[in-house]
Image (cartoon, grey):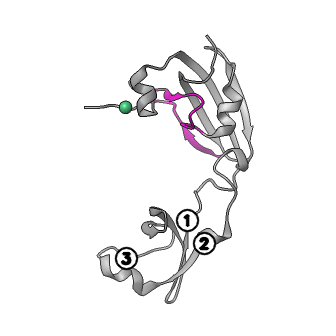
Amino acid sequence: MTITENKVVLIHYTLKDASGEILDSSEGHDPLAFIQGIGNIIPGLEEALAGKAVGDKVKATIEPEKAYGVRVEENVHIVPLSSFQADGDEKLVEGMQVRVETNEGVSIADVAKIDGEEVTLDLNHPLAGETLHFDVEIIDIREATKQELEHGHAHGPGGHHHH
Ligand code: ZN
C-alpha cells in the first residue's frame, strides 16, 4: 500500500529550519497520524509523501508557500498598551503570546515589541516565511475509517482520542 488520498499515515519526523535547528520532532512520542489529502498536514509535505510506502525515508525541503505561508505585513498591528490592562493580572512582556479578537475570530498573536505605550502584535504564524526541512520515516499506512473521514482526522495513537 502506498500513500494516496484518504489513507491514514503514521510517520516519525524531525523538522528543522534553514539553519538546521530542530523545531519539532516526534522522537520519543507516538508517530504522528494524519489523513492524506485533506489538509491535516502542510501541502508541501503531502506532496513529498504521496506515493511512498511503509519503511520509506523521505527528506523534503518545503518553501513557505507550501508550508505556513509567507509573512504578511498586514498581520502586524500596533495597539495601545492600555487595551491590555482590562484582563491583566499578568504583565505583558515581549515574546509572550496573547489571544486577540480579529474579524475572523479569536487568534493567537506574538507580542513582538513593547515601546512605551505602543505594543506591536504579530499575527503571522510563527513559521510563516520559513523554508522547512523534514526528515520523515513512514511507519504505517492504512485505510481511513468512515468515522475518521467524517471527523477529518485520524483516530488512535498519534491521532485524536475521543472519550
Ligand atoms: Zn474524531
Quarter residue 74 falls in: bottom right
- What residue lies at 55% left-to-right and 16% top-to-bottom? 141
- Helix, strand, or loop for circle 2? strand
| Numbered badge on residue 76 | 2
Distance between mark 3 and mark 2 Cα atoms: 21 Å
| Numbered badge on residue 91 | 3
User: x%, y% of residue 148?
Assistant: 42, 26
Three-letter code for the amino acid on which mark 1 is drawn: Leu
- What residue lies at 60% left-to-right and 20% top-to-bottom? 138
Could you tell whether 116 is left or right of 43 in the image?
left
Question: Is 110 drawn above or below residue 45 in the view shown?
Answer: below
Image quarter hosting the C terminus: top left
- Helix, strand, or loop for circle 1? loop
User: x%, y% of residue 52?
Assistant: 68, 18
User: x%, y% of residue 77?
Assistant: 57, 76
Lower position in the chain sequence, tag 1 or tag 2: 2
Q: Do the residues under discs 1 and 2 have CB atoms within 8 angstroms? A: yes
- What residue lies at 55% left-to-right and 65% top-to-bottom? 123
**Can you tell me which quadrant of the image ligand 1 is in?**
top left
Three-letter code for the amino acid on which mark 2 is drawn: Val
| Numbered badge on residue 123 | 1
